[in-house]
Image (cartoon, rainbow, N blue to C red):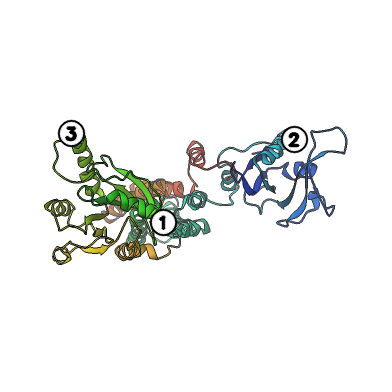
Amino acid sequence: MTDTIAAIATGSAVSAIGIIRISGSDALNVANIIFKAKNGTSLMDAEDRLMYYGEILDVTSAPSPQYNTIDFCLCMVSRGPSSYTGEDTVEFHCHGSPVILAEVMRILYSQGIRQALPGEFTKRAFLNARMDLTQAEAVVDIIESETPAAAQNAVGQLRGTISLKMSSVYSKLTDIMAHFHAVIDYPDEDIDEFNIDSYLSTLYGIADELQQMLDTHDRSKVLRDGVPTAIVGRPNTGKSSLLNALLGYDRAIVTDIAGTTRDTVEEKVLIGNVLLRLIDTAGLRKTKNKVENLGIDRSLAAISTAELVLLVLDSSESLQKEDIDALQSIPSQTPKIAVLNKSDLPSAIETNKIAELNVEFCAISALHGEGLNSLTKKIENIFPEFGTSPSGELITNARQAEAISRSLANIRSASAALADTVTPDAVLVDIEAAMNSIGEVTGKTMREDIISRIFERFCVGK
């Protein structure tokens, strides 16, 4: 990490402000060459994290001091080791023209600075011990969060919620390892003998902690990916119209021809506090059309894996046998809401029969967008946990969950061996394996090639 890197941190689209980030041992020197503050301050003497107004000069444009001005901008210096990366860093806050940003990058390249790789700024922060791997991965979660709750959980992890828990577990295991080795390696010393009950109590407590952390992973997947929600019903009840109404734009084709939707269509949408992964399905009915039957098979598959089903009924007609069949295709344990569509037309549906089927229902008009607030409240009532703000305790990362799972298995194996009075060496093997897995979560024992693969997920400039 001896070279100095730079990247556009705000993407390539036109925007009001475009930020260029520089990090490395030569960052201050190069930035001072191309930037001149209006108040005459040299960047070598600039105060940390204070904005300076000035101009960026094209030092490649002429061999004289009369250089062309590329842009008027703000510049901020942050010296290592207290910067984001742990190195000297500089940020230029320019006008957000892609042409201007590209020109600034060209000048930086001419001064020996290279283009940063994806995630390289955060990778340097990790390698310089400014953050551990859970905090680094939380940066990606913040960028990719689609709900306030997901963003809040990522902020908590960036603050170190998972890191502290992993550090506590690692420390307890280290104490056990140290005591075991001391008694085994120095039998003549005056060292407290093994206290099996105390060790078992500690290991059981660690196992409970790790299990509780793993139990959050399923909830976090829904928080991140959305609740799989199947929109089902017989043809022409308005399933695709409901999808479009919830999304706020025409995603699915809507016609009065039965069987228009023949494949599942998926989209994410935030409904109140709840992120839904909506799956618009083919109408459920008996048909001899082979293509439509394939769509119906996919509809039934979507229903079987859904965690919420919106059964769309045509409120301008009485209940049909196909409506009841559609309802019966939904697993009894799956939350469901009967959406009585076409409330703008005279009602003919028997709401008392729907109530007898013990199904929540609400009336809407997908065509006019009426009644969607009522549907939103019912969905929020089914998933009240989305109304709470996690503080970083949810394990959102599959890599972390897998490592914690391995550590838990080793802890349980060590506990069983200790309870059966197996030789200490055998117990230590499991405890050491558990510690290695915990180290993988935070990056303490992670291989370089895997670390590089993790940071490849990041965008350039982060």
How far is mark 2 from mark 1, CA to CA? 54 Å
Query: Circle 3 sits in a helix, a strand or a loop, which is it?
Result: helix
Question: Which is in the foreground here, disc 2 or disc 3?
Answer: 3
Picture layout, residue 175 above or below residue 69: below
Residue to which mark 1 is pinned: 176
Quadrant that contains the C terminus: top right
Q: Give the percent coordinates (x, y) of residue 320.
A: 13, 54
State which mark lies toward you, 2 or 1.
2
Q: Tell me the residue that label 3 is attached to.
A: 290
Type of residue at label 1? Ile
The residue at 77%/53% (across/down) is 53
Quadrant housing residue 111: top right
Residue at position x 37%, y 62% from top?
386
Q: Residue placed at 55% from the left, 39% from the top?
A: 118
Residue that carries the numbered disc 2 in the rendered image: 111
Q: Residue 201 versus residue 163: which sits nearer the camera?
A: 163
Regarding residue 305, the answer to whether it shows in the image is yes
Tell which circle, 2 or 1, labels the residue nearer the N-terminal end. Answer: 2
Decide: few, some or many residues near mark 3? Use Cα within 10 Å; few <14, some 14-19, many ≥20. few
The answer to whether residue 423 of the structure is visible from this angle is: no
